[in-house]
Image (cartoon, rainbow, N blue to C red):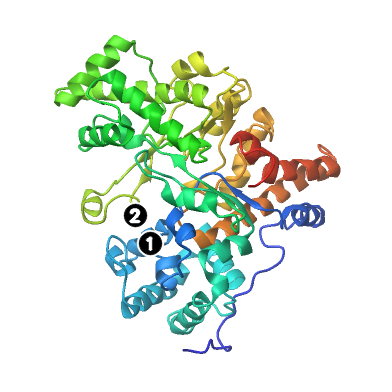
Amino acid sequence: MGLVPTTTPSLELHPDRLLPADRERRPIARRLYESVKDLPIISPHGHVPPSWISEDTPFRDPTSLLITPDHYITRMLHAHGVPLSDLGVGRGPLDDSAARAAFTALCTHWSAYRGTPVRYWLEEELAGIFGVTVRPSAETADAIYDQIAAKLAEPGFRPRALMDAFGIDVLATTDDPCDSLDEHATLAADSTFAPRVVPTFRPDKYLDPALATWAADVDRLGQVSGIDTGDYAGYVAALEERRRYFVSRGAVSADHGVIDAVTVILDEAEASRIFTAARAGTATEEEATALRRHMLSEMARMSCEDGLVMTIHPGVRRNHHTATFDTYGPDVGCDIPISVEYTDSLRPLLDAYGTHPNLNLVLFTIDETVYSRELAPLAGFYPSVYVGVPWWFIDAPEAIRRFRSAVTETAGFSRTSGFIDDTRAFCSIPARHDMSRRLDAGYLSELVVEHRLGEDEAHEAIQDLVVANPRKVFKLGGESR
């Protein structure tokens, strides 16, 4: 095992990182942050595989834990000429030599992450979790790799132990409607495991007839639900049945990653006609689009009935580079944002269901232009609508500060979702939540200094952002399991 050298530049976490530099604001921000820094983490939307937690298998190596599943890391390395396959993307487990080489690639390109939130999260992970004290580089890569690998061999670094160490109270996964959810059942039945791990219903591929796999997926939906999906009525009934199954296994939300936020409501005869044409492979592009947009409205109707919180993540051109998708599959870092419109797009859905007492609708965006123009005004009127915090490319310090400024004046703090880490990178979860708490403390300190808010109210507000908002918005109740 290599020894971490002590003569290279150090890796240190400053206690005031991300807090305001202003001398009047910083002490207030410190007090606000201190009041919430140790509160449990509530993560109501993410992508950590539930099998990691249910099986509690030791992590294989530093690369498979920290690099391969994190497309924030892999996409930047790809931009600097490192093949995704060298990072373990789209292939089986790397042997030790290949895993070490991938980790060395990250350390060699450490400067590429300067100024990015990825650099901030990685430093938090390396120093805060694994005790690394030297800055990553080509020269220190092997020693850091060995130090982390040694930690991963310890019982305290298995997934469940890390859940406890991170203070995760609630962790939501993202699951296919046809999944058995056996891992969730295992965790729910384990009285020795305190955190609450809940599934999330993610039906995208079952709602879009334009996808090449749609017909086969609808067939599978019928097989798993036990309902004939040969006609539109059976198709809808099968989706309703699988949602009920998810609710019975602890699900609190249904997530929708769509290209746009446009909704329509078709009459049943027209929806049935298009569904039949789509099953036969004869639906036009316009018809397939209309059915997809109608089904997004149907998901809202179903949420009014079964209580699942509805989250919408639109505005991303998935799999932008065809050759990368063909080689490696989805979710590897080549998804690129596009502009998105909400006010007119969501009007049919909100006109029908926006004031229903059982609907919680959380709207996310990567298009920052719509925060103050559309999302905050929608959340400031419709009792069902909440603004989702910045995600993906704008899950970053400056973007989060802009978000608070853009949304709060119109919608306040209470109409926002609470922080959402939305990650596959398990060890980055505490770093992301800590980042959010520091940034919110900074924003609130400005309101206090400007005499727009008393410090006592600022303390109440930051507590709500960390705990009360996510529990309310995602219908989690007031207690853990």
Sort mark 1 into few (<14), some (14-19) or many (20+) by Cα contacts within 10 Å.
many
Q: Which is nearer the eye, 242 or 77?
A: 242
Label 1 residue SS = helix
User: Which of the two labelled residues, at mark 2 and mark 1, occupies the earlier sequence position?
Assistant: 1
Disc on res. 332: 2
Q: Which is nearer the eye, 276 or 293?
A: 276
What residue do we see at 78% from left, 51% from top? 32
Q: Taking 125 as reference, is 396 above or below it?
A: above
What residue do we see at 34% from left, 28% from top? 238
| Residue at the disc numbered 1 | 74
- Amino acid type at mark 1: Thr
Q: Quadrant of residue 478?
A: top right
- Amino acid type at mark 2: Val
**x, y percentage for residue 453?**
82, 38
What residue do we see at 31% from left, 72% from top? 94
**x, y percentage for residue 258?**
38, 34
Q: Quadrant of residue 132?
A: bottom right
**x, y percentage for residue 363?**
51, 32
Residue 284 visible within the image: no
Instruction: Say whether residue 238 is left or right of residue 201.
Output: left
Sort mark 2 into few (<14), some (14-19) or many (20+) by Cα contacts within 10 Å.
many
Q: Which is nearer the eye, 21 or 228?
A: 228
Q: Taking 170 as reference, is 360 above or below it?
A: above
Q: Which is nearer the eye, 167 or 456?
A: 167
